[in-house]
Amino acid sequence: RKEVEQDPGPFNVPEGATVAFNCTYSNSASQSFFWYRQDCRKEPKLLMSVYSSGNEDGRFTAQLNRASQYISLLIRDSKLSDSATYLCVVIPMDSSYKLIFGSGTRLLVRP
Amino acid sequence: DTAVSQTPKYLVTQMGNDKSIKCEQNLGHDTMYWYKQDSKKFLKIMFSYNNKELIINETVPNRFSPKSPDKAHLNLHINSLELGDSAVYFCASSRRDSYGYTFGSGTRLTVV
């Protein structure tokens, strides 16, 4: 079983739509959680951290459910510029230095 | 000013050759990394150095050897390149606690 699992998509949505991505992780002792964004042929960039209390950054909302080992990302009012691959990332308890990436969920926002 | 810069951006080489990829960061971070993104787009850590000391060495063939001359540089040398080494290699750096990760723009290696 992969340490971090995501639906690869693609999710194909019209502009203005709301879209949600999910991610599950296998190690219950994982300590920190993030969503990264990767554009085609570019490096990954931090989108936002994820906290149990839920956190929001503009149109983006992230949520962590430690009991279910589940992380989500909600994007409201999708823009064309949101088209990218969204990577779920976990930091394991045994190493605070390494990021463990999911394989990513591809989002395509159409006009 | 580029925060994490790696060179070259593209590298095409024949099987059996030896090649190096260089990485430099000007963020003052203590920790640097090499990640590999394969053809399935799966990103996985290879190595990490903290203040020139190797702290993470995942299951990577001995043909891959990282070198950190100082905490601002982490180079990756690959011996006897194989077809399966074709991938995008990303250098990254972070503060001590792995927050504030910054990735370089990647080196696309193609072995023919």
Image (tube, coloured by chain):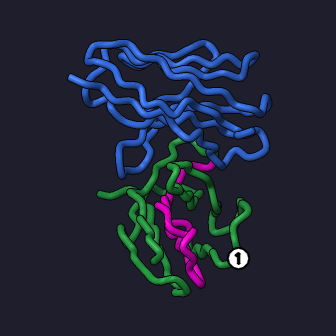
Chain colours: A blue, B green
Count of numbered circles on the image: 1
Residue at screen point 39% across, 30% down? A107
A75 relative to A2 in the view: left or right = left
Residue at screen point 33% across, 32% down? A83
A100 relative to A34 in the view: left or right = right
Tell which residue pokes out farthest to the left in this image: A111
B1 relative to B3 in the view: left or right = left
Residue at screen point 43% across, 42% down? A45
Measured as percent of width and height from the top left, residue A76 is found at: 36, 13
**Amino acid on which disc 1 is placed:** Asn
Within-10-Å neighbours for mark 1: few <14, some 14–19, many 20+: few
Residue labelled with disc 1: B62
Measured as percent of width and height from the top left, residue A50 is found at: 57, 24
Report helix, strand or loop for mark 1.
loop
Seen from the viewer's position, the closer of residues B49 and A109 is A109
Q: Is residue A16 depicted above or below B67 in this figure?
A: above
Q: Quadrant of the C terminus of chain A?
A: top left
Measured as percent of width and height from the top left, residue A77 is found at: 31, 13
Q: Which residues are magenta?
A: B71-96
Seen from the viewer's position, the closer of residues A26 and B56 is A26
- Figure quadrant of residue A102: top right
Measured as percent of width and height from the top left, residue A39 is found at: 36, 42
Magenta highlight on residue B88: yes
Q: Is residue A24 depicted above or below A20 in this figure?
A: below
Query: Could you tell me which chain the residue with mark 1 belongs to?
Result: B
A89 relative to A58 in the view: left or right = right
Q: Is residue A5 depicted above or below B110 in this figure?
A: above
